[in-house]
Image: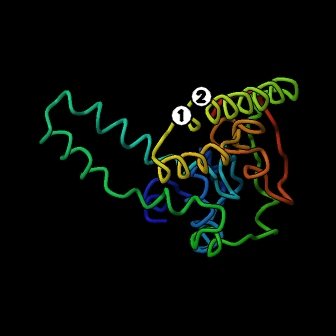
Amino acid sequence: ARETARVVATPEQAVFVCHSAGGLAFRYYAERKRGGFERAVFLGTPHGGVGLTQLKFIVDAGTFFGDLKFGLPEAIQRAVREGTRQVTHDLHADSLFLRYLGYDAALASRYEIYCGRRFNDLEAVGLTAAVAVVQRLLAREVVARIEQPRWKEQLGRLVDRLELPVEVADGDLIVSVDSASLPDARETTITRLNH
């Protein structure tokens, strides 16, 4: 709200273009703080949250190990600077933030939604089948060969839960079409673009 007041002479005439979680920040400004705007364009905004946030620790670990090339102290400093990334917690489908944000049908009529569906139906079926094949291979070639019962059980449970995320099968690889959509939006356009 402060930044809008600083750079926009008439906020009620401003068009906001928001990408990803930036769209949620805008909705907080418009819906909870009642900030002025003419309309908003959302690009891949996860209005309904995302399920991929549980994979963030893998990305963080990869980044940390990549940063080790700068030395252990630098890798630790970079990780600490990044912090816990609260936004990751706020993007879960049932997060406190998304519940607090709620939904305003009157404002939704001033929203334009652009979301991605990277794969067509045939491609999505093929990817789903490939994940099922990998799941069977992991169960047969990896889990079955583990001798330690506890490890075998834990890895077996992980393999059993392996599935193609909806964000990939029916989304832009990060946000699903369903999550990016909002009822009562002025217009929703589905593209083949990645997030």
Q: Quadrant of the C terminus?
A: top right
Q: Which residue is denoted by mark 1 in the rendering?
A: 145
Mark 2 is surrounded, within 10 Å at the Cα level, by few (under 14), some (14 to 19) or many (20 or more) other residues, namely few
Residue furthest front in the image: 147
**Is 11 located above or below residue 15 in the figure?**
below
Identify which residue is drawn at 76% across, 46% down.
113
The dot on residue 37 is none
Q: What amino acid is labelled 2 in the image?
A: Glu
Q: Secondary structure at mark 1?
A: helix
Query: Viewed as shown, does residue 148 lie left or right of 29?
Result: left
Q: Position of residue 72 (x, y in %)?
A: 14, 38
Identify which residue is drawn at 49% across, 65% down.
1
**Is 67 located above or below residue 51 in the figure?**
above
Q: What amino acid is labelled 1 in the image?
A: Arg
**Is 31 located above or below residue 125 in the figure?**
below
Q: How many marks?
A: 2
Q: Nearer the viewer, residue 40 or 50?
A: 50
Identify which residue is drawn at 76% across, 70% down.
104
Q: Nearer the viewer, residue 2 or 129?
A: 129
Q: CA distance from mark 2 to mark 1?
A: 7 Å
Q: Nearer the viewer, residue 81 or 42?
A: 81
Q: Which residue is denoted by mark 2 in the rendering?
A: 141
The answer to which image quadrant residue 99 occupies is bottom right
User: Is label 2 in contact with label 1 (beta carbons under 8 Å)?
Assistant: yes
- Mark nearer the viewer, 2 or 1: 1
Mark 1 is surrounded, within 10 Å at the Cα level, by few (under 14), some (14 to 19) or many (20 or more) other residues, namely few
Q: Position of residue 109 (x, y in %)?
A: 82, 59
Q: Position of residue 29 (x, y in %)?
A: 57, 66
Q: Secondary structure at mark 2?
A: helix
